[in-house]
Image (tube, rainbow, N blue to C red):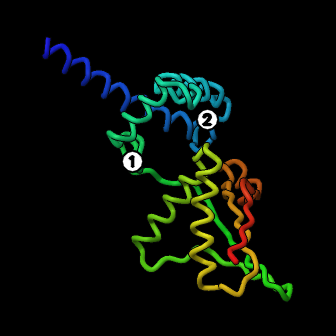
Amino acid sequence: MRRRFYLTWFLLHFFLILAVSFHSVFQDLALGLSWLSPFSEPLWKKGEKLTENATGVSLKDSNPVRQVATLYLYSAGIPAGYGYFAPNIPNSTKLVFELHYDDGRIEYELPHVNDTDAGQRLITLLDYIGQTDYEPLRQLIVKMLAFSLWQTHSDASSVRAVYGYIKEPTLEEARTGATEEYHLLYTYDFKFR
C-alpha cells in the first residue's frame, strides 16, 4: 500500500513538472517567440490551454482544487525562476518612473541597483510583475519600487510608474525594416507625502 502511494505521488509530481514545463513552452510558441511559422500559433494556444487545465490555472482563484494545486506547485518550487530544461529568460519588460515636481518639472528614472546580481533579480521581478494576474499585488510591488526611488527624490510631489514591454520584430519583420515596439501595460500614480 505504501509503495503504491509513493508511486502515485511521484507520478503526480512528475506530471506537474511536465505540465508546467510544456505550458511555458506552449506559451512562448503561442506568442510567436520562435522561428516557427506563425500559422502554427493556434495549435500552440490549444496546447497552452490544455496545460492550464491540467495544472488548475484555468480554474477560479476561489476554487479549492486550484488553491491546493497552486500551493503544491509553489511549495515544490516547480514554476519558480526555472523551467524544466533551462533558466527562465524574461521578456523585455521595462519600468520607467516619472517624477513630478511642484514647479512643473518632470524627470524620468529607471529602477536603480547596486550590482549585477541585484540587476538580475530586478529583471526577474519585472518579468513577474507582468505575469501577475492579481492587480493589488502587482500595484503593491510597483509601489514599493516607486517608494524606494522617491526616498532619493523626496522633493517630488508624485511618482508615476509606467510598465510595459518591448516587442522585438520577428526575422521576417526585421527584413522589411521593422524595429522594436514599446507596448504600455500598466500605469500607476503614487503620492508619498
Location of residue 113 with respect to 120 vertically, above or below:
below
Q: What is the spatial separation of the Cα atoms under label 1 and label 2, in whole angstroms?
A: 19 Å
Which quadrant holds residue 49?
Answer: top right
Location of residue 128 with respect to 75 vertically, above or below:
below
**Mark on residue 82?**
1
161 left or right of 21 in image? right
User: How many C-alpha atoms fall within 10 Å of the one at disc 1: few (<14), some, or many (≥20)?
Assistant: few
Could you say where residue 47 lies in the image, as x and y percent from the top left?
A: 55, 25
Q: Nearer the viewer, residue 52 or 92?
A: 52
Instruction: Identify the residue at image location x=61%, y=62%.
Output: 142
User: How many C-alpha atoms fall within 10 Å of the one at disc 2: few (<14), some, or many (≥20)?
Assistant: many
- Report the amino acid beneath label 1: Tyr
Quadrant where the C terminus is found in the figure: bottom right
Chain-order first, disc 1 or disc 2: 2
Q: Which residue carries the number 2 mark?
A: 30
- Report the amino acid beneath label 2: Ala
83 left or right of 152 in image? left
Could you say where residue 118 lies in the image, as x and y percent from the top left?
A: 43, 71
Instruction: Identify the residue at image location x=52%, y=54%.
Output: 90
Could you say where residue 147 lies in the image, as x and y percent from the top left?
A: 60, 73
| SS at badge 1 | loop
Q: Residue furthest top?
A: 1
Which quadrant holds residue 139?
Answer: bottom right
| SS at badge 2 | helix
Location of residue 13 with respect to 136 vertically, above or below:
above
**Mark on residue 61?**
none
163 left or right of 144 in image? right
Q: Residue furthest front?
A: 193
Instruction: Identify the residue at image location x=82%, y=85%.
Output: 102
Q: Nearer the viewer, residue 69 or 171?
A: 69
User: Which tag is nearer the camera, tag 1 or tag 2?
Assistant: 1
